[in-house]
Image (tube, helix red, strand yellow):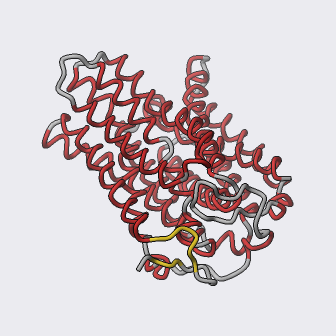
């Protein structure tokens, strides 16, 4: 049961990544076909981001009432319907309309699955699962490219991905009985945490108890610190993905094709780094992974900033930053039950997802405005500053909380 459900969750993480790159990969053809300005892509991404934030904030209530399995299946079905809706859209306003259910579905399944894996599986699986998101995000541009180069329209790529999501929805519905048969990991936050499958059975616990109110969640010691950490990480990740190539070309004199290739290596570095981190995550522990990740990103930022005639160090720095980024997101999520208690984890992870989407949405345009005023040379400093902020907040959290030290009702004990 454990292995079969894990396989389903792995596939679900691939499906999470599949649609994320479709807008960017297909937008040149889409905006020309629809007759709208290039900048209208930002409207779509803002609508999707707003939906994901709203559903993330509801991620504590829905699984408690309906169960994680049902929420995941319905959410994937919602994204499938949205993608199929986009595939038959012939106007921009229809794309905006379908962006709403896509954002709501993506945010709900992201928060629900992250919390379930944090409670039920070891740290290595969290890293590997998020690497599978990278696999999905890497596949969809090839699907779009194949559709366009084969004489089909951009809509066929959305149809293919939408049908794949439909198949996954039925697989999730068929696997609903499995969700209550996997036992939970007892969160300790240590590198020697118990293996998955041990501890108290979760069973129907997803539907029991009362949701933790937002105000109460925010008052839990350390929550604001972890939200700031998550915001900083996702801000540096999204800013690097969008602006790294422009920095390499404009400031370091790197050829456009070379810069594009290494900008993609940032994403591949994240994916490969999560695969590698999974092999030693259980021994090292979440806190060291987060600390080492932010330090490595900072080193990569310094390499990007070095005023050398050759661009080799800058290119290598981008890859180093990608590898450093790899374990941060999974480790923050996986450490949540240990830091804030099992009862609070779903509410905290929902807020973390909202902070993540907010950072990913706000930071790139903010940097764009800042660079227009100061110059693109500030890109490495922006990345280093965000890495330093994330490291500072995570270290303050480490000093504040004792992993696994919770009151009987699930509240966190702070250091005195």
Residue 293's x, y, as percent? 43, 44
For image coordinates 65% across by 82% down, the residue present is 210
Q: Is residue 83 visible?
A: yes
Residue 375 horizontal side relative to residue 415, left or right: left
For image coordinates 23% across by 16% down, the residue present is 310
Residue 173 horizontal side relative to residue 111, left or right: right
For image coordinates 57% across by 35% down, the residue present is 276
Q: Quadrant of residue 311?
A: top left
**Image quadrant occupied by the C terminus:** bottom left
Query: Residue 341 or 44: which is nearer the viewer?
Result: 341
Total count of labels = 0
Query: Residue 395 or 376: which is nearer the viewer?
Result: 395
In the rendered view, tell whether residue 360 sits above or below residue 340. above
For image coordinates 36% across by 25% down, the residue present is 316
Residue 183's x, y, as percent? 78, 63
Q: Is residue 18 visible?
A: no
Residue 89's x, y, as percent? 57, 42
Query: Residue 39 or 361: which is nearer the viewer?
Result: 361
In the rendered view, tell whether residue 247 sits above or below residue 416. above
Residue 138's x, y, as percent? 56, 31
Query: Residue 43 or 215: which is nearer the viewer?
Result: 215
């Amino acid at each position: 049961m454990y292995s079969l459900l894990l396989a389903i969750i792995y596939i679900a993480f691939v499906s999470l990544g599949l649609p994320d790159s479709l807008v960017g990969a297909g937008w040149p053809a889409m905006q020309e076909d629809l007759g709208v300005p290039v900048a209208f892509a930002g409207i779509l991404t803002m609508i999707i981001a707003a939906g994901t934030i709203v559903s993330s904030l509801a991620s504590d209530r829905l699984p408690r009432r309906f169960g994680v399995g049902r929420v995941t299946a319905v959410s994937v079905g919602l994204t499938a319907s949205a993608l199929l809706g986009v595939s038959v859209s012939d106007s921009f306003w229809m794309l905006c309309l379908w962006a709403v259910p896509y954002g709501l579905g993506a945010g709900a399944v992201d928060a629900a699955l992250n919390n379930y894996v944090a409670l039920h599986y070891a740290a290595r699986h969290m890293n590997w699962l998020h690497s599978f998101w990278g696999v999905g995000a890497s596949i969809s541009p090839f699907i779009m490219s194949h559709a366009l180069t084969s004489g089909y329209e951009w809509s066929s790529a959305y149809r293919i991905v939408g049908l794949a999501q439909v198949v996954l929805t039925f697989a999730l519905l068929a696997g609903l009985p499995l969700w209550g048969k996997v036992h939970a990991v007892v969160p300790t936050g240590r590198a020697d945490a118990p293996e998955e499958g041990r501890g108290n059975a979760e069973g129907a616990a997803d539907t029991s108890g009362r949701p933790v109110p937002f105000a109460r969640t925010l008052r839990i010691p350390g929550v604001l610190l972890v939200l700031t950490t998550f915001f900083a990480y996702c801000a540096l990740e999204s800013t690097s993905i969008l602006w790294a190539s422009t920095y390499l070309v404009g400031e370091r004199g790197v050829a456009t094709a070379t810069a594009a290739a290494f900008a993609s290596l940032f994403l591949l570095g994240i994916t490969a780094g999560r695969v590698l981190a999974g092999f030693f995550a259980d021994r090292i522990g979440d806190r060291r992974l987060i600390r080492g990740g932010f330090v490595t990103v900072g080193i990569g930022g310094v390499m990007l900033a070095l005023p050398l005639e050759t661009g080799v160090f800058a290119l290598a720095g981008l890859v180093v930053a990608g590898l450093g980024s790899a374990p941060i997101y999974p480790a923050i999520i996986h450490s949540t039950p240990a830091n804030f208690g099992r009862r609070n984890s779903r509410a905290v992870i929902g807020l973390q997802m909202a902070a993540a989407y907010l950072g990913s949405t706000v930071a790139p345009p903010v940097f764009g405005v800042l660079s227009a005023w100061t110059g693109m040379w500030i890109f490495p400093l922006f990345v280093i500053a965000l890495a330093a902020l994330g490291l500072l907040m995570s270290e303050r959290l480490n000093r504040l909380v004792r992993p696994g030290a919770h009151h009987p009702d699930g509240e966190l004990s702070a250091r005195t």
